[in-house]
Image (cartoon, rainbow, N blue to C red):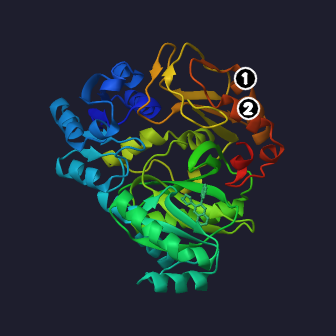
């Protein structure tokens, strides 16, 4: 096994990874920005190095500082967590070239899936369903308009280098297409340095369902069921659950097999997530593949009993998958609420000092967090304070358990979205499992 791992991240995910390393008997190196000197991940790791000023660009995104930190501490591997450098193929390649194991897929897989046009082509070739799209490329604006008309409005214009909802433009009519196309291209060029875009049929009010996959370096690939992440706002997920309240065994197997087929076809290794949209007629369409561990991975851990972070580390080390598909059993129901430091009505971030804190507990309650009483939430990073995760035998029991935990939780000094989560727990559509990606627009 690895002797020492550097964690190129902060907050709850850095803490989560340090805990997994400790269980595996691996020493840990934390890196931190000047704003995170007193943060929990810095304290829990065996060693900690400052890698630069508060701004992410100067610290958690500073490739040379991070590589130097790994070299001076003799870390054999780097875990990138999520966000920051986690899906940066260049960073993975630099690690590979420096003899440091990047705990994730190969830079080749990351680059392939990072280009959403290439990814879609690959997936279409495998006969996994995708929405009608500009599969033969776009020559110019006139060609784009022809393609959009053929697909039929409404259409959505997406950036090849985008993903996660960044760089998308919804177009309802041909009258507004030309303008939208230009803007989309220019914005994509400015944001990603790549102006390539593609056009896709717009799917009305779908659910967001994603499949967790896991692959070793010997061609073994399994899926760990789905997560339903339909409750989100501006592409920020707020609440996730597993299993989805609407999938039956047949559909689950269909989506799982499709995800495994994609991973297998591209020689994917380590853990990843294949995202689908599920429409009102229960038809699913491939959207994109995320080549990292996700924020919401705990709900899958709770229903499968598999520690996804520990598996990531073992797989990066070159171990074989320890189980086959038939050994993956799903038990009960799990829900995660993302507790953010933000105004519950306006969603505006609310950094500041936490003056009082009580974390809920009891059977089937898990909290992944890096905050404590007296801690100051810095304004420089995302506003995630804690992930409150519950597990119970049934969805109804999980909802009650979450409602109880939310009532028990106390965070003072910063505003949080706990009141929003409490409202969601009482919502009749949510309770009935009737949600789509527009669910939260009713709340604010
Ligand atoms: C779509 C769509 C409707 N039709 N594509 C946003 C994230 C990215 N992975 C794909 N996204 C969407 N693509 C077509 N053709 C609607 C969304 C979308 C969405 C998807 C999942 C979860 C939340 C969302 C919120 C707004 C839009």
Disc on the earlier residue, 1 or 2: 1
Q: Who's the residue at 45% across and 47% down the image?
A: 322
Residue 118, horizontal then vertical, whole percent: 41, 71
Q: Would residue 354 be visible to someone looking at this image?
A: yes
Judge from the rendering whether residue 85 lies leftward or rightward of residue 334; answer left or right.
Answer: left
Above or below, 200 relative to 290: below
Residue 250, horizontal then vertical, whole percent: 70, 64
Element under label 1?
helix
Q: Which mark is residue 25?
A: none
Element under label 2?
helix
Q: Which quadrant is home to the C terminus?
A: top right
Looking at the rendering, which quadrant does residue 387 occupy?
top right
Q: Who's the residue at 51% across and 42% down the image?
A: 295
Q: Which quadrant is home to the N terminus?
A: top left
Above or below, 134 relative to 443: below
Q: Nearer the viewer, residue 275 or 54?
A: 54
Q: Would residue 130 be visible to someone looking at this image?
A: no
Q: Nearer the viewer, residue 167 or 60?
A: 167
Looking at the rendering, which quadrant does residue 337 occupy?
top right
Residue 301, horizontal then vertical, whole percent: 56, 40
Judge from the rendering whether residue 187 lies leftward or rightward of residue 108; answer left or right.
Answer: right
**Disc 1 and disc 2 in contact, CB within 8 angstroms:** yes
Residue 69, horizontal then vertical, whole percent: 21, 33
Q: Which mark is residue 422?
A: 2
Name the residue beneath numbered marker 1: 407
């Amino acid at each position: 096994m690895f002797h020492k791992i550097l964690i190129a991240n902060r907050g709850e995910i850095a803490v989560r990874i340090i805990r997994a390393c400790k269980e595996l008997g691996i020493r840990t190196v934390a890196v931190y920005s000047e704003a995170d000197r007193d943060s929990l991940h810095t304290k829990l790791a065996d060693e900690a190095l400052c890698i630069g000023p508060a701004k992410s660009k100067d610290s958690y995104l500073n490739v040379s500082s991070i590589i130097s930190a790994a070299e001076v501490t003799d870390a054999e591997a780097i875990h990138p967590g999520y966000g920051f450098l986690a899906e940066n193929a260049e960073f993975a390649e630099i690690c590979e070239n420096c003899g440091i194991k990047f705990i994730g897929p190969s830079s080749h897989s990351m680059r392939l899936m990072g280009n959403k046009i290439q990814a879609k082509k690959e997936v279409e070739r495998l006969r996994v369903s995708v929405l009608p799209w500009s599969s033969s490329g776009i020559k110019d604006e006139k060609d784009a308009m022809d393609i959009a008309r053929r697909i039929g409005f409404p259409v959505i214009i997406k950036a090849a280098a985008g993903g996660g909802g960044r760089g998308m433009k919804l177009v309802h009519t041909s009258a507004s297409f030309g303008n939208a196309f230009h803007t989309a291209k220019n914005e994509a060029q400015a944001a990603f340095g790549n102006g390539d875009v593609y056009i896709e049929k717009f799917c009305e009010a779908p659910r967001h369902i994603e499949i967790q996959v896991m692959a070793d370096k010997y061609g073994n690939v399994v899926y760990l069921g789905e997560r339903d992440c339909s409750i989100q706002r501006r592409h920020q997920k707020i609440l996730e659950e597993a299993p989805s309240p609407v999938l039956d065994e047949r559909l689950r197997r269909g989506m799982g097999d499709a995800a495994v087929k994609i991973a297998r076809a591209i020689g994917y290794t380590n853990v990843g997530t294949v995202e689908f949209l599920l429409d009102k007629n229960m038809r699913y369409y491939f959207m994109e593949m995320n080549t990292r561990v996700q924020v919401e991975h705990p709900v899958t851990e709770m229903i499968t009993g598999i520690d996804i972070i520990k598996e990531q580390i073992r797989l990066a080390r070159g171990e074989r998958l320890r189980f086959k598909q038939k050994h993956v059993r799903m038990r009960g129901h799990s829900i995660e609420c993302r507790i953010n430091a933000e105004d519950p009505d306006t969603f505006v971030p609310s950094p500041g000092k936490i003056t009082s804190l009580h974390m809920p507990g009891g059977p089937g309650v898990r909290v992944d967090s890096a905050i404590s009483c007296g801690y100051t939430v810095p304004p420089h990073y995302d506003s995630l304070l804690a992930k409150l995760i519950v597990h119970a035998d049934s969805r109804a029991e999980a909802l009650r358990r979450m409602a109880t935990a939310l009532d028990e939780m106390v965070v003072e000094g910063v505003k949080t979205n706990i009141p929003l989560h409490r409202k969601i727990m009482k919502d009749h559509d949510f309770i009935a499992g009737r949600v789509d990606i527009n669910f939260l627009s009713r709340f604010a």
